[in-house]
Amino acid sequence: MNKAVFFDRDGVLNPLVYNVQTGEYESPHRPNEFSVYPSIIRDLRLLSGSGFQLFLISNQPSYAKGKTSLENIQAIHRLLDDYLKDNQIIFSEYYYCYHHPDGIVAEFTGKCDCRKPKAFFLQKAEKDYDLDLSQCWMIGDQDTDVQCGQNAGVRTIQILNPHSAKKRGNSCPDYKAENLTEAVQILVNEQ
């Protein structure tokens, strides 16, 4: 069976962006706000070279909340995917949840099965890619990422991104790391 690393996106692979309207750091809402952390290609190559499949699992409720368009969210995804492919990094699958329980766009408002901390997408990947979840990891910067990983039975690393500190503190990850590079070193040393 195969092993994999599941990544949250915002605050892990790319910086969070300050939203003047909410006064908080959030996911980018427009393509021109999107950038990646400089080390991600090196870090992701190390994991791929160590035999891990790469997956992304991200809650993206900004359209449901009326903060941006679905087209903008999809354009940001294409920027990430194109950047990774241009650098020969292939993710087996990208899983996005666009729902939010308190949204304002009807078709994306309410409870769903795919929003983290639910483990729906990890379990889907397990079936679709013949993964051994006991050999897999979840890396994210919020408690919901850790809880999602734990709900699926994978080991977890929490990135201590200062801009998402308010969304941490109620979970017990297996490890904590200052950034993705440190998380990847932990993971490689533990395999």
Image (tube, rainbow, N blue to C red):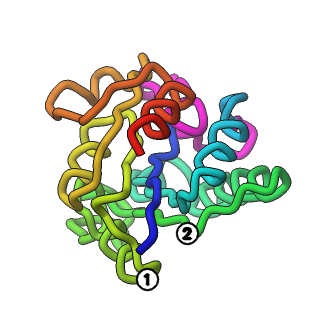
Few, some or many residues within 10 Å of mark 1 (<14, 14–19, 20+): few
- The type of residue carrying mark 2 is Glu
Question: What is the x, y in percent for residue 87?
Answer: 82, 50
Q: Earlier in the sequence, mark 1 or mark 2?
A: 2
Q: Which of 161 and 49 is in front in this view?
A: 49
Q: Is mark 2 on a helix, strand or loop?
A: strand
- The residue under label 1 is 128
Seen at 58% across and 39% down, the residue is: 13
- The residue under label 2 is 93
Seen at 28% across and 54% down, the residue is: 154
Q: Is the C-beta separation of discs 1 and 2 under 8 Å?
A: yes
Q: Which of 79 and 138 is in front in this view?
A: 138
Above or below: residue 164 compared with residue 59: above
Q: In which quarter of the image is residue 6?
A: bottom left
Above or below: residue 91 compared with residue 68: below
Q: Tally the numbered discs.
A: 2
Taking the image as shown, residue 108 lies to the left or right of residue 20, namely left
Question: What is the x, y in percent for residue 30?
Answer: 66, 44
Question: What is the x, y in percent for residue 91?
Answer: 62, 62
Name the outermost residue toward the right: 86
Q: What stretch of residues is rendered in magenta? A: 11-35
Seen at 58% across and 69% down, the residue is: 92
Seen at 28% across and 70% down, the residue is: 120
